[in-house]
Amino acid sequence: MLTSKQHYKETILLAWPLILTQVGHIITSMVDTIFLGQIGVAEQAAGIFANNIFILLLVFGIGLSYATTPLVTAANEKNDLEGKAALFKNSLFLNICTSVVLFLILFFSAPLLQYLQQPQDVVALATPFYEVLIFSLLPLSIFFVCKQYCEGLSNTSAGLIISVLGNILNIVLNYLLINGYMGLPKMGYMGSAWATFIARSFMGIGFLYLMYKTPTLNAIFTVYKKVKVNMKHLGELAKIGFNSAMQFTFEVAAFVIAGLMAGSFGKEQIDAHGIALHIAAFTYMFGSGIGSAATIRIGIFNAQNNWQEVKNAGLTAIKLVLMVMGGCGLIFLALNQYLPTIFSSEKAVIELASELLLIAALFQLFDGLQVTVIGILRRLEDVRISTLITFIGYWVIALGLCYVLAFTFKLEVIGVWIGLLASLIFVGLTLLWRFRYLYKKHLRF
C-alpha cells in the first residue's frame, strides 16, 4: 500500500502538466477578451457573448471525449494494443460526428442571438464573431480525443506541448490580425475570431501529427487499419461519454444562462461578469487538472479492484484540490481590486468585477471539489447519480436562485453570482457524499 506522501507525489506529478494544458484552454479566451477590451466595451461584450453561446455546446463535445481516458487506461493495463487503437478510432468517429451535429445546431441558431435580451449593438457585433468561432468545433473535437487518449496512457505532456504552441499562435495572430501588421489585413475585433479559429485548427491537426511521430504513442497506427468502427466500442464510449457530456453541459449551461441574466442589466454588467468568470475559470483549471490526474490514478487502482487505494488516491486528490483552490481564493481576496484591470480600463466594470471576485473567492473551494470528485466517479463508472446531482444543482438550485436574487430581490449580477455559489456548494458536498458512500460500501465487503 502506498504511503500518503507517495500518493501526493504521484498525484502532483500527473497533475501539473494537466493543469498547464487546462490553463492553456482558458488562456485562449482570456487573450481574446484582453485584446477586445483594448478596442472597446461593446466589442469586448460581443466577444464574451459569442464565446458564451459557443461554449454551451462545445462542452458537450468535450465531455463526450472524456470517456476515452478510463477505457484506454483499462486497455493499457491489459497491454491490449488493438483495443487501444479501436478505442481511439471509435472515439474519433463518435466525436467528429457529434461535432458536425453541434456545428449545424450552432450555425442555424445564429439568427436567434437577437432574441436573447442582450443590447442590440452587442448582438450586431457578436453575430459575425460567433459565425467564425463555430468552425473551430471540428479541430477542437480532434484535439480533445487525442488529449484524452494520451491521458489514458498517463502521458500528460503531449497535450501540454500542443496547448502551449496553440496559445502562442493565438496571441501572435490576435496582435497581427486586429492591428493589420506584417502586411495582413486590419480586421479589428474580427481578427480575434479568426486568430482563435486558426490556432484551434493547428491544435487539432498538430496533435494528430505529434501522435503519429511520437514512438511512445504511434504504435496504434500499426494496427489502425485493422480495427473497425463498431457498436461495441461506440456503445462503451457513448455510455460514459453521454453522462459526462451532460454533467459538463448542466454546469456550463447554468453559467451561460447566468451570463444572459447579467447581460439583461447592460454592457458593463456583461463585461464585469465575463471578466470575473474568466479569472475564476483560470483558477478552476487547477482543480480540473487535479481532477483529471485523479481520474487516471483511480483508473489504475479500480482495474486492480483495490478499493483501499481507490479511497486513498481519491481523498489525496480532494485534499490537494482544496489546498490549491483555497490558496487561489486568498489571492482573489487580496487582489480583487487589481485583477480586473488586466482586462478593462473602464472604472464601472472594474468596480463591479472586483465585487464578484469576493464571491468567487469562496466558490473556488467548491468548484474545485466538484470537478475533482466528478472525475473520480467517472472513472468508477458511477455516472448516473452524479449526473442527477449536477442537474439538480445547476438547473434547479442555480437557475432558480439566480433569477430570484437578481430580479425579485434586485441584486442584479451580484444575485446571479450568489446563486451560482449556492449551487456549487450543493453539488460539491453531495458528490463528496456519493464517493464516500461508494468506498465505504466496497471496503465493508
Image (spheres, grey):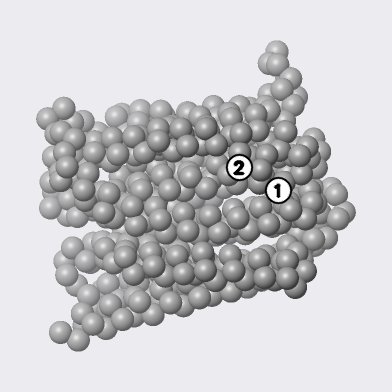
At a point 30% along the width and 44% down the height, the residue shown is 149
Q: Name the mark on residue 51.
A: 2
Position of residue 100 relative to residue 292, above or below, is above
Quadrant (top left/top right/bottom left/bottom right) for the N terminus? bottom left
- 280 vs 231, left or right, is right
Q: Nearer the viewer, residue 93 or 186?
A: 93
Q: For the residue marked with disc 1, what is the amino acid?
A: Gln
Along the viewing direction, whichever of 391 and 284 lies nearer the viewer: 391
Q: In which quarter of the view is residue 88 placed?
A: top left
Camera-nearest residue between 108 and 16: 108
- Near mark 2 (Cα within 10 A), the count class, few <14, some 14-19 or many ≥20, is many
Identified at 39% across, 80% down, the residue is 433
Element at badge 2? helix
Q: Nearer the viewer, mark 1 or mark 2?
A: 1
Q: Earlier in the sequence, mark 1 or mark 2?
A: 2
Quarter holding the C terminus?
A: bottom left
Q: Is residue 353 above or below residue 193?
A: below
Look at the picture and state if 379 lies above or below 24. below
Q: Determine the CA span between mark 1 and mark 2.
A: 16 Å
